[in-house]
Amino acid sequence: MNILFIGDVIGRTGRRALSDRLHRLVDEHQVDLVVANGENAAAGFGLTAPIAMELFDLGVDVITSGNHIWDKREVYDFLDREERVLRPANYPPGLPGRGAGIFTTSAGLKVGVINLEGRVFMNNLDCPFRAADGLIEELQQQTPIIFIDFHAEATSEKMALGHYLDGRVSAVICTHTHVQTADERVLSGGTAYMSDAGMTGSGDAVIGMRKEQAIEKFLNQVPVRFEVAKKDPVVCGILISVDEETGRALAVQRIQERAQL
Amino acid sequence: MNILFIGDVIGRTGRRALSDRLHRLVDEHQVDLVVANGENAAAGFGLTAPIAMELFDLGVDVITSGNHIWDKREVYDFLDREERVLRPANYPPGLPGRGAGIFTTSAGLKVGVINLEGRVFMNNLDCPFRAADGLIEELQQQTPIIFIDFHAEATSEKMALGHYLDGRVSAVICTHTHVQTADERVLSGGTAYMSDAGMTGSGDAVIGMRKEQAIEKFLNQVPVRFEVAKKDPVVCGILISVDEETGRALAVQRIQERAQL
Amino acid sequence: MNILFIGDVIGRTGRRALSDRLHRLVDEHQVDLVVANGENAAAGFGLTAPIAMELFDLGVDVITSGNHIWDKREVYDFLDREERVLRPANYPPGLPGRGAGIFTTSAGLKVGVINLEGRVFMNNLDCPFRAADGLIEELQQQTPIIFIDFHAEATSEKMALGHYLDGRVSAVICTHTHVQTADERVLSGGTAYMSDAGMTGSGDAVIGMRKEQAIEKFLNQVPVRFEVAKKDPVVCGILISVDEETGRALAVQRIQERAQL
Amino acid sequence: MNILFIGDVIGRTGRRALSDRLHRLVDEHQVDLVVANGENAAAGFGLTAPIAMELFDLGVDVITSGNHIWDKREVYDFLDREERVLRPANYPPGLPGRGAGIFTTSAGLKVGVINLEGRVFMNNLDCPFRAADGLIEELQQQTPIIFIDFHAEATSEKMALGHYLDGRVSAVICTHTHVQTADERVLSGGTAYMSDAGMTGSGDAVIGMRKEQAIEKFLNQVPVRFEVAKKDPVVCGILISVDEETGRALAVQRIQERAQL
Ligand SMILES: [Fe+2]
Ligand SMILES: [Fe+2]
Ligand SMILES: [Fe+2]
Ligand SMILES: [Fe+2]
Ligand SMILES: [Fe+2]
Ligand SMILES: [Fe+2]
Ligand SMILES: [Fe+2]
Ligand SMILES: [Fe+2]
């Protein structure tokens, strides 16, 4: 079976790029489940219920997220209600939403999806390694197919988690830097790994946002208002083929496509 | 003319991988100048004079570096003596070594090379954007061909510098994360750009170091001794074709090759 | 001559505390110049022109600041116009405002005031040590009396700057943590030093802000709206006696007074 | 009953200062239990078994610590063996040592001691707030008298924990910045609080280490070897009077004394 994962969708540019490419990608690669990171889908900062519904309408089955999911308070209730939206599991207990779930494809396959966030250069969260241990044990009781979106900054933390979980899950695919890495592979234990899936949004930008504003920020070191860039939209992600019986990844294919808006 | 840039060479594994592949790469692509980042060439931490000489013997013309160049005190004098080794230019005045130079290819072409370090999640240095402004102005008086190794962590800072310098230099190629990115391109102004050239060392590792040690570090959060990993050596880098008259980049080609040790 | 320095004034609570105590402090201690850090005077985040005028009306002669001075865009023009408001001098060139000035007391004494910001755990700025070197040289041409507000987080950076400048300025008094330290003293070279002057605002709070909100932030690790606390207002600062001829500090006295609102 | 807490003891200078003052302090203030932070007792970096025994011989009853406790591998076994040495409780499970204990005074009073570490600008640990909740519940089954050494950098995190635990423990006294704060008090719920107890070591230094080395570090931003300073030794800490029945703090007194070596 095939899982398509789409990296951080950035504002309207990202949603439009997805609208242009997603159906074709699903058809072409016989995709069974589409997971997309939506932490920047609402104007670059967070997610809202209407925008999540828009992503579902475009063909996304599960939305994962990261540090930006908390940007808009209005989404908190929605996180509690909508099981198809995940936020990193290793935030403190008591917060809205959930960090993992089991999703069933139209062919009836159960796929576990886990969302985690790194700690290096990021928030002060519970250990993602131990959080993964617990969640994998739970989900494995229902399915051998488990996909993880690890939202993290440092390549060392990402690669360490990939190797730590190698052989226990189908895929550890990372997000957050918004730049796609060229290290996609299947690790020796059968886990698909990639240090960053990249972002889905303007390619003529600084991590999806207007480049003049980013340059101004670095030159001046004072607060800057960031807006989503529009030019050269791209869709970035990764396609993972998984053995349905064992949950082992069989192959990976990096996705980086220009969209026509 | 063609510049080959090699990402952070990690310990003996990296040097041996380079020994296996570099001559072939130079021949195959008619390379005029080889620049390699050597900040991790000495057992993963820093550089020494003998190891720098070993890299020159292998065919490297210029060694750039980054935050780890200061790890071994014994290299400080050498930095003052050896013009072919650069350290980031935006460290405070008064430190050993230099951050930029002009190098002449065997065909007699002059190439300016600048080494800079980012500040986000890194050291407290002078502004790399303004440092670049000054150095480019200087080097441009001698040559339109200027290559920059920007050693930085955050993708936002890297991309911002790339766009900021677009049209003023031949290439802004970044290092430090040790994971090659898949975003190599020539920006609209004619500057080659890539968010990370990747590393040259063991591919079955965590950023070139032994994976069990890295996992232990993240699990326990206490000091760990890191050693260079040995398996699956790879050479990562980028090949840049530059118009000799204008200094504009004409094409880029990502390099990621397995080595035989 | 006597300089009274008042630590970060936090919102209306801080301004009202100052209104209650400042005149008495000035009278009691025969203060010649009042310097106050105003980076949090506007509802805890930044400064505005009307609030700066309010502080001047209360008896403040010079307002220094820190990282929060840039919070409100509307103050930028004012920073250019109003010489009595300083922002850290080691921000990049080209930003509004200035980081140092000479101020004349009613007795006709000239006092140089310098505002600097630390880099450890803070913004990516120019080196405060070297910035201090240059500004001191300038100001010393007009007066031996120089007061520095060093707005910084790490005690190591603060104490290092104090010792670095010992004998060259009248005082290095630090701010930013909002907690007064008990290490006020005159260093061996004649420079008054204190690792933090403390804040002027609610003492029944977390660094001047409502304590329930701060606790929520640490428990949940998601964005929280912070509001200025109101109970138990205090005025914190330090009184420095300076030899007018030599600029050397003669004595220091820590100020921590409860206000009646 | 009276608890004397001594802030971070820095190398031999700190141990000698303690040797000079501790007995007098204990006698003068009728101290029932002496707790001292020993994370820097071994040449400024970590602790060893012989040095811990030296501190016990000087009259210390319980040694707490912080991030530096892990600096010397040789202490790990000792942490497992010696119940009187604590390390922060919120490190990952499985590490050597323990983070809390019950200690009995010569008068037969039981005192719970908890050691925690902050996360802001520090290591990626488990939540100290939730860790405190669990440990307090345990210790309260044996005694109402509970002392906490919260080893942390940010004043906001320290004050938030103090208020969070107010009324549940006898004291939240913080360490790590090595600079004593002037905010010691008994909070409204009966918990003694202080943002930093300060350090015990050379007062003519940068947080206890040689000042020229610290200045060099900030000027050059490259690795520096730090050595313990020797001049002007001081003992810093806090004396807390606790109601034996309720565990509420009755009074606090800041301790800052010069030692004669
Ligand atoms: Fe994102
Ligand atoms: Fe993110
Ligand atoms: Fe490196
Ligand atoms: Fe590096
Ligand atoms: Fe402040
Ligand atoms: Fe501040
Ligand atoms: Fe310490
Ligand atoms: Fe510490």
Image (cartoon, coloured by chain):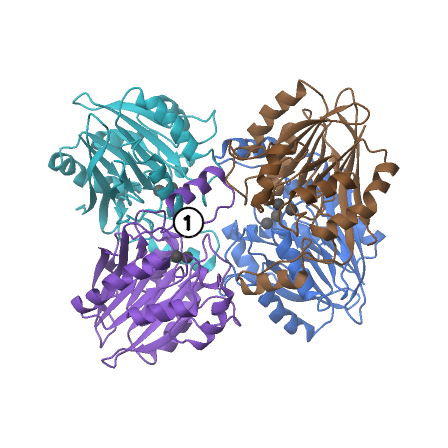
Chain colours: A purple, B cyan, C brown, D blue
Inspect the image, locate mark 1, and give the three-letter code of the amino acid beneath it.
Arg
Say whether residue A126 is left or right of residue D113: left
Residue D137 rendering spot, x and y as whole percentages: 65, 73
Task: Please name whichever residue, A194 or D113, is drawn nearer the observer in this view of the structure.
Answer: A194
Name the element at disc 1: loop
User: For the view shown, which residue lies furthest in the left direction?
Assistant: B28
Task: Please name whichever residue, A156 or C76, is drawn nearer the observer in this view of the structure.
Answer: C76
- Position above or below: D223 against B217: above
- Position above or below: A261 against B45: below
Q: Is residue B82 visible?
A: no
User: Mark 1 belongs to which subunit?
Assistant: B
Residue A193, picture quadrant: bottom left
Q: Give the quarter of the figure containing the C terminus of chain D.
A: top right
Q: Is residue D75 visible?
A: yes
- Position above or below: B257 against D135: above
- Point 18% across, 69% down: residue: A27
Say whether residue C176 is left or right of residue C249: left
Residue C66 rendering spot, x and y as whole percentages: 61, 41
Residue A214, picture quadrant: top left
- Point 38% across, 69% down: residue: A52
Please give the residue where the numbered disc 1 appears in the rendered image.
B225
Number of numbered discs: 1
- Point 32% across, 41% down: residue: B174
Mark 1 crowd level (few <14, some 14–19, many ≥20, 10 Å Cα): few
Task: Please name whichever residue, C175 or D195, is drawn nearer the observer in this view of the structure.
Answer: C175
Residue C190 rendering spot, x and y as whole percentages: 73, 27
Residue D259, picture quadrant: top right
Q: Give the quarter of the figure containing the N terminus of chain D.
A: bottom right
Residue B141 rendering spot, x and y as whole percentages: 31, 20
